[in-house]
Image (cartoon, grey):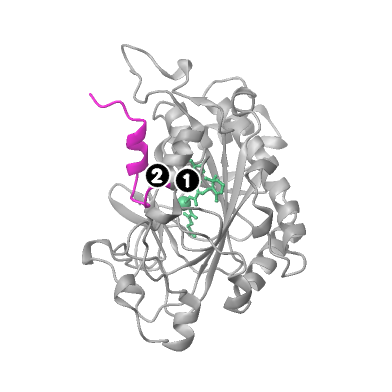
Amino acid sequence: MAPLPISSIRVGKIEDVQELIKSKPNKVPERFIRESNERGVIVSLKTQHHHHIPVIDLSKLSKPHTHDDFFFEILKLSQACEDWGFFQVINHGIEVEVVEDIEKVAKEFFEMPLEEKKKYPMEPGTVQGYGQAFIFSEDQKLDWCNMFALGVHPPSIRNPKLWPSKPARFSENLEGYSKEIRKLCKRLLKYIAISLGLKEERFEEMFGEAVQAVRMNYYPPCSSPDLVLGLSPHSDGSALTVLQQSKNSCVGLQILKDNTWVPVLPLPNALVINIGDTLEVLTNGKYKSVEHRAVTNREKVRLTIVTFYAPNYEVKIEPMDELVDDETNPCKYRSYNHGDYSYHYVSNKLQGKKSLDFAKILN
Ligand SMILES: COC(=O)C(/C=C/C1=C(C)CCCC1(C)C)=C/O[C@H]1C=C(C)C(=O)O1
Ligand SMILES: O=C(O)CCC(=O)C(=O)O
Ligand SMILES: [Fe+2]
């Protein structure tokens, strides 16, 4: 996947949000202020009667007591993927230390002086390194967030110069964490295949050497959270995304359901999973990639660690034959190469589900 030509992109000054609040804690620069229709309203969990995203107990799938337990959980999973595009997993089997260790080094990374973080810059037109991704013009609004993103697997997508030497255990912890998350993604894809009535290796065989990337999002507190967004609305280009919210995290992630922004309540020791654009295409729209965004709050920092898991760039993507029926369920997306979609995805600003127009067959 070739980077964009840097010389053609003028993005203006991108202020570092952590530095901004140190020097002017009560000021929100114009470039962060959203139009009134897109502002991040914080939806209180106490006063609103929300439905919450489904919770899947993975121990019921890996060690079911009965056949019924297994199939009930698979049914819950298929409903979660169809109706929500999001769910949380509990009893996922990843050791608490692995989850805590990555959070610790991520926090330490963001808390280092700017000069140190600037050694790993995200250049305009690229998506790896420290900075703000998906900015392509001088008048584009900025998110109230600092990001650090790295390609992890296969090794060919890594840029070793961007793997930081400080904090000391950053790379070691990220390697360990990524191995565990990769195993989890493979397991989830097996269960998702079963939920679709497919053989369990279907996705693993199709994906080849899957691409895996990580993005750490650090949302500093904001004096006017109602004017800004932590992260613009988007769907993920991946097949699956795994999101870890920091321990004792406040609510920040919201998903768009029936035209309402629904907050995702952080649960202890749970991971949030969402269906990406690639699974939406493969399932011919049966499972949906759902638009989501992050909002900020006045008091607390929020940190999330997000893994994108996707097929190898060489893989041809198209709705699976089993999920297409010319009469009752016609094909909604064209075939394309996953590398081309990745390039398209990262060369456009985050804008709801717009990236998927790339693949839609318009009637
Ligand atoms: C919100 O999405 C992203 O930040 C993102 C970026 C992923 C990537 C890196 C950080 C480095 C290596 C390449 C890659 C593009 C995977 C989303 O990635 C999605 C988009 C596609 C397409 C995909 O495969 O993952
Ligand atoms: O930080 C969050 O809550 C959302 C992050 C996210 O959606 C992303 O990084 O793609
Ligand atoms: Fe996302």
Residue that carries the numbered disc 2 in the rendered image: 290
Q: Nearer the viewer, residue 67 or 240?
A: 240
Q: Nearer the viewer, residue 233 or 348?
A: 348
In this view, the mark in front (2 or 1): 2
Label 2: few (<14), some (14–19) or many (≥20) C-alpha neighbours in 10 Å = many
Residue that carries the numbered disc 1 in the rendered image: 86
Q: Residue furthest top?
A: 327
| Highlighted magenta segment, given as a residue range | 347-363
Residue 239: x, y in percent?
52, 37
**Can residue 138 be seen?**
yes
Task: Check residue 122 for magenta coloring.
Answer: no
Q: Is residue 38 left or right of residue 118?
A: left
Q: Nearer the viewer, residue 157 or 239?
A: 157
Q: Residue at x 40, y 26 (%)?
A: 284
**Can residue 80 be seen?**
no
Q: Residue furthest front?
A: 7
Asked if labels 1 and 2 touch by Cβ distance under 8 angstroms, the answer is yes
